[in-house]
Image (cartoon, coloured by chain):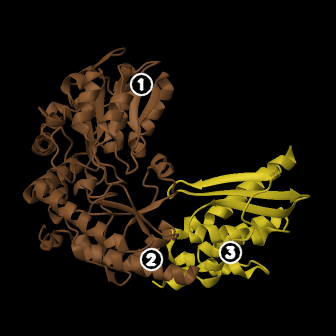
Chain colours: A brown, B yellow
Amino acid sequence: MINSSIRDQFPILNQKINGHPLVYLDSAATSQKPRQVIEAVKAYYEWDNSNVHRGVHTLGSRATDAYEGAREKVAKFINARSVKEIIFTRGTTTALNIVASSYGPAAVGEGDEIVITQMEHHSNFIPWQQLAKRTGATLKFIPLQQDGTVTLEDAEATITDKTKIVAIAYVSNVMGVTNPVKELAAIAHRNGAVIVVDGAQSTPHMKVDVRDLDCDFYAFSGHKMLAPTGIGALYGKKALLEAMEPVEFGGEMIDDVGLFESTWKELPWKFEGGTPIIAGAVGLGAAIDFLQEVGLDNIHRHEMQLAAYAEQKLSEISDLSIYGPRNRQVGVVTFNLGDVHPHDVATVLDAEGIAVRAGHHCCQPLMRWLQVSSTARASFYLYNTEEDVDALVKGLIKAKEYFSYELG
Amino acid sequence: MNLDDLYRRVIMDHYKNPRNRGSFEDDALKIELNNPTCGDRITLQLKVEDGIVKDARYSGEGCSISMSSASMMTEAVKGQSLERALELADSFSSLMKGEDADFGDYEDIEALSGVNKFPARIKCATLAWNALRKGIETEEEHQQH
């Protein structure tokens, strides 16, 4: 396990909520930020702030170096071939929408197929649903097993030579499922389709190698991996990105602008219209440094141990149902406590200083599949401890007692 | 933070023994409303005759606060004029802001005053009342045509 002294690096964790020490179990929604990241953003604004790619002055060069340096870190972090394949975006949602709105209409036509699953987050669901509607393509779903996983047999049966795009999460934000992305990429490619991977829940928690996965597009958010909000990235294979039209037009992304025609800058800048998210990129670079110092393998192992501990402790609470597969590979545990509504569970936990998510987790189609209106979710990160899990269990027992008394 | 401020006995009673839960078979005015941030849903039906809410029913999914609030709301507006129903909705808004609010004879609703101390839960409590407002608007549009 990662030494709990790492918590000292996260100033926000050192506070009391409603009279109790904060137990933050909502990192799948957004992670907390270490001092190193906060300081990097602060230092950027205090010393280097300037616009990029234009100023001849010293600050302009420093800001450009900081911004492009962060891009190099991202490229290495996910093992892209080149920095040209890394486009900074506002987050996963924007990244996926770039693919759906630029690559989508050029690749998909009437009678074609787009293949997704019912476990997708709305941000990897609605863009494809709307693309299918606009183009007359058919939206197909790889069916889910009882435990919320997909099988390669079903994927083989769903993905056909009419399929142009397969879009799937590497890790589900609700079920704690890790999808066999590498194998799915092979199936997609055999059928002449590209695969788009939603990496929002995988990138912060495990080693990701886009070349090994052989995915065509890969999207992730900084704020779930210790970086500030408002920064994320889209990875795309160079040949695909080069053939794509920009989505946003404006400053920074042009080569030459005439009265009636314009040409675009080379990759990656043609997709980065307007002043980019410079401080956010600097923060993301610092977050990557932090994660690599701790080690992604250590983080993954730590979270799996916590998840296993949580599964075991939670299953000792009668009436508590856990969704998703046993022996999960990620630190996300979604559950319901008998008849008590997840909002009520979350409010009782909050009174104990424990932060969990309650609701549909931006996964309404998955909630329908689970036949629930909402669930509670605890998610872990490198700063969580077994004591946090113990606090959660204690809080849940309290919630149960409270409501069995009130409802009794 | 005292949970008992939020989960008052009368609230839990409405949650456990909902009043007016169900639906009308006929073509009574029907309003469906979601709370997209949390997945709560309500379907409210109102029977309005001569500007009076003769009867009200609701169905839906949600937490103790949203469902008990719906139960109380339907109790409160039954037999009231649309004008009075709207006044009650305004009173409920005041209650959620922590201001004094008058619900006439129907005092159960005041039990929801504690929700004000739990900002994240205000949207739960107001769902049914927003459905009521939408219903009144729809009914008034009908009258004008």
Q: Are marks 2 and 3 on the same chain?
A: no
Of the 4 image quadrants, the one containing the C terminus of chain A is bottom right
x%, y% of residue A350? Answer: 40, 75
Q: Position of residue A301 (x, y in %)?
A: 15, 59
Q: As shown in the figure, which amino acid type bears the numbered disc 2?
A: Val
Q: Is residue B25 visible?
A: yes
Q: Classify mark 3: helix, strand or loop.
A: loop
Front residue (pair B34, A271): B34
- Categorize mark 2 by other alpha carbons within 10 Å: few (<14), some (14-19), many (20+): many
Q: Chain of mark 2?
A: A
Q: Are marks 2 and 1 on the same chain?
A: yes
Q: Are marks 3 and 1 in contact (CB under 8 Å)?
A: no
> Are circles 2 and 3 on residues that touch, CB within 8 Å?
no
Q: Which of labels 2 and 1 is toward the front?
A: 1
- Whether residue A249 is visible, yes or no, is no
Label 2, label 3: how far apart the Cα atoms are: 22 Å
- Depicted B16 relative to depicted A44: above or below: below
Q: Residue furthest toward the right?
A: B50
Residue positioned 7% across, 58% down in the render? A293
Q: Which residue is mark 3?
A: B17
- Which one is in front, A59 or A89? A89
Amino acid type of the residue tagged 3 in the rendering: Asn
Q: Would you name the residue on which mark 2 appears? A: A348
Marked residue chain, label 1: A
Mark 2 or mark 1, which has the lower sequence index?
1
Q: Classify residue A292 by image quadrant.
A: bottom left
Residue under circle 1?
A113
What is the three-letter code of the residue carrying label 1?
Answer: Glu
Q: CA distance from mark 3 to mark 1?
A: 49 Å
Q: Is residue A36 left or right of residue A216?
A: left
Query: Quick one: label 1, few (<14), some, or many (20+) residues within 10 Å?
Result: many
Q: Residue at x 71, y 67 (%)?
A: B89
